[in-house]
Image (cartoon, rainbow, N blue to C red):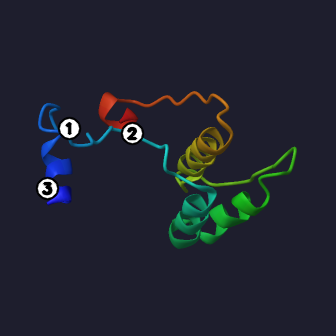
Amino acid sequence: SGQADARDSNDDEPRRKRKYKKNDISSLTQEDFDTWAEEHLFEYQKHLRRNIGQLVRNILKSRQIGATWYFAFEAFENAVMTGDPQIFLSASKVQAE
């Protein structure tokens, strides 16, 4: 059959499975970020996100409320969507990956 011949004609070339790339972000879209944010962010984090376009955002906050985590998410979203470089620091290699 024609289909069998077409499949057999490529026997010379090894079949390569698409290898999963660690930290591959090429498929992320704005819709992905919006959906994730709506489902996972706390209300005060959503408030920060709604005001992302403000030149200055003065924030009075207590300690350990997730602000650093939120701003890392915001920077990551910006890097993915604009291609602008961002610098991420972490305490360990495990956290960095």
Provide residue 15's location: percent of width, then percent of height: 17, 39
Dot placed on the residue nearer the N-terminal end, 1 or 2: 1
Structural crowding at the residue carrying mark 2, measured as other residues with C-alpha within 10 Å and reported as few (<14), some (14–19) or many (≥20): few
Asked if marks 1 and 3 touch (Cβ < 8 Å), the reply is: no
Provide residue 21's location: percent of width, then percent of height: 32, 38
The residue where tag 3 is placed is 4
How many badges with numbers are in the image? 3
The residue where tag 2 is placed is 23
Per the model, the C-alpha gap separating discs 1 and 2 is 20 Å
Provide residue 32's location: percent of width, then percent of height: 54, 61
Per the model, the C-alpha gap separating discs 1 and 3 is 19 Å
Q: Secondary structure at mark 2?
A: loop
Specify the quadrant that holds the C terminus: top left
Asked if marks 1 and 2 touch (Cβ < 8 Å), the reply is: no
* Residue at the image point whose x is 55% and y is 56% from the top: 65
Q: Which mark is residue 85?
A: none
The residue where tag 1 is placed is 16
Return the residue nearer the eye: 22 or 18.
18
* Residue at the image point whose x is 59% and y is 42% from the top: 80
Q: Secondary structure at mark 3?
A: helix
Structural crowding at the residue carrying mark 3, measured as other residues with C-alpha within 10 Å and reported as few (<14), some (14–19) or many (≥20): few
Dot placed on the residue nearer the N-terminal end, 1 or 3: 3
Return the residue nearer the eye: 68 or 34.
34
